[in-house]
Image (cartoon, rainbow, N blue to C red):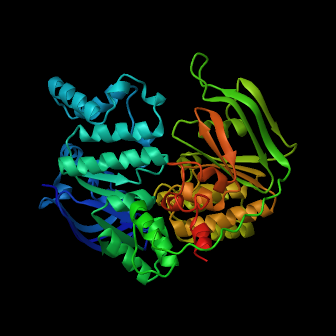
Amino acid sequence: MAEISIENLSFYYAGQEQPALKDISLHIRQGEFVVLIGSSGSGKSTLLRQLKPILTPKGTQSRMIKLDEQPIGQLNAKEQAEKIGFLLQTPEHQLVAEEVWQELAFGLENLGYHTETIRMRVAEMANYFGIQHWFDRSVSELSGGQKQLLNLAAILALHPDVLLLDEPLSQLDPIAAENFLLTLRKINRDLGVTIVLSEHRLEQVLPEADRVIVLDGGSVFCDGEPAKVAECLAKVQHPMFDSMPTPARLAAALGFEEYPLTVRQGRAWVQTLSLAGEMTASNKKSVGEKMVEAKRVYMRYEKNRQDVLQELDITLHTGELYALLGGNGSGKSTLLQVLCGIRKPYAGKIRQRKGIKIAMLPQDVQTLFGKETVQEELEEITTDTEKLQQIIKVWKLEQVLIQHPYDISGGEQQRLAMAKLWLLDADVLLLDEPTKGMEQAFKRHLAQIFAEAKAQGKCILMASHDIEFCAEYADRCGMLFRGELTAEGPAGTLFEKHMFYTTSVNRMVRNICPQAVTIRDLLALRG
C-alpha cells in the first residue's frame, strides 16, 4: 500500500514569520494520480518536500504525516529512498554518474543491493523505459527529455511506493513532455505507484489526473476531480483558472458553464458552435534596425563531434520579441550562448550593432545566485534605491525580499533572475525558458513587461517550449532542428503548419479554420 495522510500540517521557513503552509489536511489514496497546482509561492514544492523528510527545508513545522499509518519522520534514509521517489524539475541536478547504465545502478549500489539484483533491475528498467539503445552512452550527450526519463528510470529501479515530482515538464519540449506523461500514467496504471506531481503546464497534465489539489497562500483552496476543480475556479474567478487547459478557458470566454479539458473534448464542442465571423488580418509589424545578425554559423563542442549549430542564419531587430522553438537538444541554448559571446563558432560571422549591451538569462537561473537574500541579489547589480523599488514592484518580489534565493519557488526564482537582468538595462535580452515555473496570470504580466521593453527599442530573443505564450505574444518565431533554422515567420503562419508544435486552439479547429492559433483568433471567428 501507499496511502499518505496529512493532518494539520503547517511549516515556517527559518527566519520567516508567515507560514509557507497553513493547517493542511489531506488523504491521498493508494494508486492515485494527484496534481498540485497553484501560483508561484503557493506552497507546492514546499508541500512535496514535506513528504520526503530528507529533503524538507530548514524551518519549523507542526505536522503529522503518515505513510501507510507509519509516521513519515520515523522512516530512515534507506526506507525513504526505497519507498518514496522524488524527481526534481532540473534533470542535471539529480544526475550523478557519467554513463547511463551507471546512473541506473547508482541508487541500488548505494543502498547495498547484491550485484545480481542490480543487474536484473537495471536491465528491467532499461527495457521498460525503452532506453536500452542508449544504455552505454554518456549522460552528458542526452537531451533534456532523455535525462529526465533516465532520472525516472533510476528512481523506479528502487521500486518505490510513492513518486513525487516537482514540475518535471518544465524543461521538456511538447513531444518529450507528452511522452513523459504517458510513461507516468503507465507507471501509475500498471504498477500502482501513487503519484503526486506539481506542475504549471496544465494543458497536458490536467487530463491525466485523477485528482487536482489547488494551493493558495499555503492552504488548500480546492480539491477534487479535474473538471470539478475547473468549475470551482471559474465560479469564483480565481486567477488559477487562467492556467486551465485552453478548451476550458475558451468555453468560459464564450459564456458556457461546461469546461472541456482535452483537445478531443474541445474539438467535439467547437463543432457545435457557429463560427461565422472572420479573423482580422494582423498588421504586418515594421522591421526595426538590426541589432544582432548571425550568418552561416557552425558550432560544435568538440573537434571530432557532430555540429550543434550548422549553416545557421538569424537576424534580430529593435523592438521585437523573437521566439525560438525546437526539441530538447536542437541547439536553442547553444545559439543563445553564441549570440552573447559565451561560446565561439568555428565558422560563420556574428555581427552586433556598435555599442549595444547584451544580457542573457541561463536555463538554470540558480547559477546567478550567490547571496543570502533576494534583496542582496538585487543590490549586487545596483544600490540605487529608486531603481530597486521600481524593479521589485515590476517583478512582484515584495514578499520574498528577506528570503534566501534557494528557498523561494521556481517561478519566483525566474522572476528574481530576470529582475537582475532588467537592472542591467541591456539592449538585447537573450532569455532561455523565461516562462518556466510561471502561472498564466504572471505570464500575462510578463508579456506587458516585454511590450514595454520593445517600446524602448530593446530586442528580446527567447528560447522556449511554451508554445501558447509564443503564439500569443511573439512577433516572429523560428524552429530549430538539429542546429538548423528550418522554419521562420509570424507566429500564426508558423503554428498553423505544424501538428505537434502548435497550440491547443489550432488542434481543435484546424479542420474548420487552420489559421486560428489563439483564443483571440477563435473569438473573432465566433463573431
Kindly tell me whether residue 39 is visible in this rendering: no
Q: Is residue 394 visible?
A: yes
| Quadrant containing the N terminus in the rendered view | bottom left
Give the image location of residue 305, x and y in percent.
Answer: 56, 19
Task: Residue at 56%, 68% (x, y): give it.
Answer: 519
Within the image, what quadrant is residue 352 found in? top right
Residue in the foreground of this view, choosing between 14 and 192:
192
Q: Position of residue 411 (x, y in %)?
A: 51, 60
Q: Residue furthest right?
A: 354
Note whether 249 is above or below 147 in the view shown. Answer: below
| Lateral position of residue 441 relative to residue 25, left or right | right
The residue shown at (79%, 39%) is 293
Task: Tell me which corner region of the image, top left, top right, bottom left or bottom right, holds residue 201.
Answer: bottom left
Q: Nearer the viewer, residue 47 or 175?
A: 175
Q: Position of residue 99 (x, y in %)?
A: 38, 25
**Image quarter of the C terminus:** bottom right
Q: Is residue 86 left or right of residue 171?
A: left
Q: Position of residue 368 (x, y in %)?
A: 59, 48
Q: Is residue 480 left or right of 280 when viewed as pictured?
A: left
Q: Residue at x 72, y 64 (%)?
A: 281
390, 119: nearer the viewer = 119
Number of residue marks? 0
Identify the residue at image location x=73%, y=24%. 347
Q: Quadrant of residue 72?
A: bottom left
Image height check: is 339 above or below 299? Answer: below
